Amino acid sequence: MHGMAPLSPHAAAGLLLFILLGLLLANLAETVLHRYHIFSIPGSGAIMCLGIATGFLVIWTNSAWEVELEFDEHM
């Protein structure tokens, strides 16, 4: 992590909860699309829109998680 200080345990737990909530919402989106027979948008498209909205939310709130969620091309 390019010289960044690690997250505190409280912030790391919050980040983990945020990621798990995102996975839960993605599963819920797939279930709703399947249950109500919505074929105008595929499930993967709904999940991509959810990911984009989540990314904007993290950037908009100027969260400390933004540094942890950056794409690392060396990883």
Image (spheres, rainbow, N blue to C red):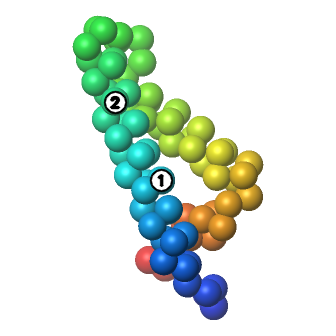
Residue identified by numbered label 2:
28
**Where is residue 17, by image quadrant?**
bottom left
Label 1 sits on what residue type?
Phe
Name which residue lies at 41% across and 46% down.
21
**CA neighbours of label 2 inside 10 A, class few (<14), some (14 to 19), many (20+):** few
- Cβ atoms under marks 2 and 1 closer than 8 Å: no
Q: Residue 48 appears at what percent x and percent y?
A: 47, 37
Name which residue lies at 64% across and 52% down.
58
Asked whether, in this view, residue 31 is left or right of residue 71, the answer is: left
| Nearer to me, 60 or 7 | 7
Q: Residue 14 appears at what percent x and percent y?
A: 50, 62
Alpha carbons under labels 2 and 1: distance apart: 15 Å
| Nearer to me, 10 or 24 | 10
The N terminus - image quarter? bottom right
Residue identified by numbered label 1:
18
Q: Residue 71 appears at what percent x and percent y?
A: 55, 66
